[in-house]
Image (cartoon, grey):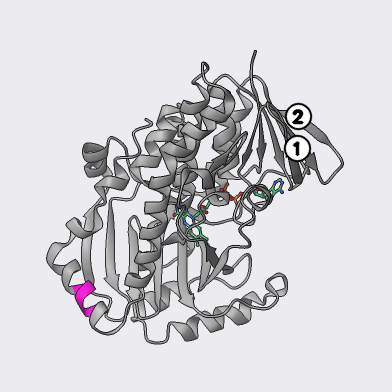
């Protein structure tokens, strides 16, 4: 008989998990607390290890239609504007890792995953339903929603993000930690920018206590900008004054080169302007038992929230889902063993990516001798420092 997999959360991780579980021959019931399935306006970089997972699901064409495929990654000094190192992307990545390096609008990635999930038989998507807890028995898990529903399944996958309810019950390890870093994000139509500020590549600008990243999305039509600075989060994010805080951001970049300042000033304060994310994470996963116990498993940010300095949070959620598919396909094992197999295959890689993301933050924002050493090695070793074979080769699932 088909197993029934319950999924908490309909973000990128939850939808990828739904697709993986359905492709493994399971019935899927997904519960998303928001009334509509949607993603905020911001970009996501997808390295070849992640694009390969999407290709394995047959999503190459829809990705091709919405993504931008930058030619190179360039690292520059935020103060002088000097180029420190370049990594060719494009066909170089295809030759080395079997897939392109893509940049997408989050909403486009979400939409293409949702369309793929909707084509699967046996998938039911429920909106406006908040998972508020679960009860586990020997061979079933009963999920409770805040709206008074009770649903029984063979497994529960908690893909309910950074402040996961499922994780709170499964691990009880308290809230995530604040990083002291703030991400300002904006999306700008490239056509509205002066020609000199448009881009077809990924550029990372490294400064003291800050860095910025810009890249094209939506076939190059839009430019995604992220600036990360250090500081306390605002007390009331809901009533955050975007226009005033764009001025704060400009002040934080006072020592930056004129090109970076021009890019930041190019974001109109009208419309969605700059949006602010205080960044939080957790220490790296330390065992398989932190990702799955019994009939409950965690996936994506619920399992391994990370700082965005390796651009892999959504990528690891998608890799998790590909491994979940493999594990759920082991029909001769009971469900708890399949989830254990999933966790065993994923936890060390997720931990490594979390640790590397955290380390990158320290290196990107370095001052003094560390900064000098970083710049010298970038100049000397170039692409060899920027290429990350263990990451881009993937986890062996596809
Ligand atoms: C500045 C920044 C830049 C980034 N850049 C990149 C990048 O370039 N590449 C990359 O791969 N990653 C990037 N990331 C990380 C990436 O955005 C996240 O890792 C990814 O979105 C996590 O997806 P998720 O589905 O696990 O969680 P989420 O996106 O948080 O989704 C969780 C979903 O669960 C729902 N939910 C929550 N609680 C409940 C509940 N109790 N019941 C039901 N539903 C619930 C929420 O409404 C939400 O829809 C970046 C992050 C930041 C902050």
**From this viewpoint, is residue 116 visible?**
no
Question: Quick check: can you spot residue 243?
Answer: yes
Q: Tell me, yes or no, whether the two marked residues, 1 and 2, touch with CB atoms within 8 Å.
A: yes
Identify the secondary structure beneath mark 2. Answer: strand
Marking on residue 289: none
Q: Residues within 10 Å of mark 2 (few under 14, many from 20)?
A: some
- Disc 1 marks which residue? 143
> Looking at the rendering, which quadrant does residue 263 occupy?
bottom left
Label 1 to label 2, Cα distance in Å?
6 Å
Residue displayed at 60% across by 76% down: 233
* Residue 89 left/right relative to 356: left
List the residue tagged with mark 2.
152
Work out which quarter of the rendered image holds the C terminus and state it.
Answer: top left
Residue range of the region highlighted in magenta in the rendering: 371-375
Ligand 1 within 8 Å of disc 1? The answer is: no
Question: Residue at (74%, 41%) from the top-left corner?
Answer: 134
Give the image location of residue 349, x and y in percent.
Answer: 38, 46
Q: Is residue 327 above or below residue 127?
A: above
């Amino acid at each position: 008989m088909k197993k029934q997999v319950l999924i908490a959360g309909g973000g990128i991780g939850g939808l990828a998990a739904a697709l993986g579980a359905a492709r493994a021959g399971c019935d899927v019931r997904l519960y998303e607390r928001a009334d509509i399935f949607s993603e905020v306006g911001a970009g996501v970089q997808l390295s070849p290890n992640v694009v390969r997972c999407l290709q394995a699901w047959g999503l190459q064409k829809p990705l091709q239609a919405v993504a931008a495929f930058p030619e190179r990654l360039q690292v520059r000094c935020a103060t002088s504007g000097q180029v420190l190192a370049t990594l060719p992307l494009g066909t170089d990545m295809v030759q080395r890792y079997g897939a392109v390096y893509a940049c997408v609008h989050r909403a486009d990635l979400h939409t293409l995953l949702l369309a793929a999930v909707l084509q699967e038989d046996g998938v039911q998507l429920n909106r406006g339903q908040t998972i508020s807890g679960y009860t586990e028995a020997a061979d079933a898990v009963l999920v409770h929603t805040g709206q008074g529903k009770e649903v029984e399944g063979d497994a529960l996958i908690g893909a309910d993000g950074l402040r996961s309810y499922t994780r709170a019950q499964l691990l009880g390890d308290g809230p995530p930690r604040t990083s002291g870093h703030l991400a300002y994000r904006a999306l700008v139509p490239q056509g509205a920018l002066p020609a000199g500020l448009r881009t077809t590549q990924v550029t990372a600008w490294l400064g003291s206590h800050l860095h910025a990243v810009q890249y094209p999305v939506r076939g190059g039509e839009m430019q995604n900008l992220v600036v990360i600075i250090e500081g306390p989060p605002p007390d009331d994010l809901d009533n955050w004054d975007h226009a005033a805080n764009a001025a704060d951001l400009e002040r934080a970049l006072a020592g930056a080169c004129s090109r970076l300042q021009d890019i930041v000033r190019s974001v109109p304060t009208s419309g969605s302007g700059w949006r602010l994310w205080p960044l939080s994470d957790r220490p790296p996963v330390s065992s398989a038992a932190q990702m799955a116990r019994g009939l409950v498993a965690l996936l994506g940010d619920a399992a391994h929230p990370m700082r965005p300095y390796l651009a892999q949070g959504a990528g690891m959620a998608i890799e998790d889902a590909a491994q979940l598919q493999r594990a759920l396909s082991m029909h001769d094992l009971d469900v708890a063993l399949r989830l254990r197999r999933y966790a065993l295959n994923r936890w060390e890689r997720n931990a490594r990516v979390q640790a590397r993301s955290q380390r990158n933050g320290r290196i990107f924002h370095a001052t003094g001798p560390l900064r000098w050493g970083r710049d010298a090695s970038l100049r000397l070793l170039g692409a060899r420092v920027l290429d990350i074979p263990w990451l881009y080769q993937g986890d062996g699932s596809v």
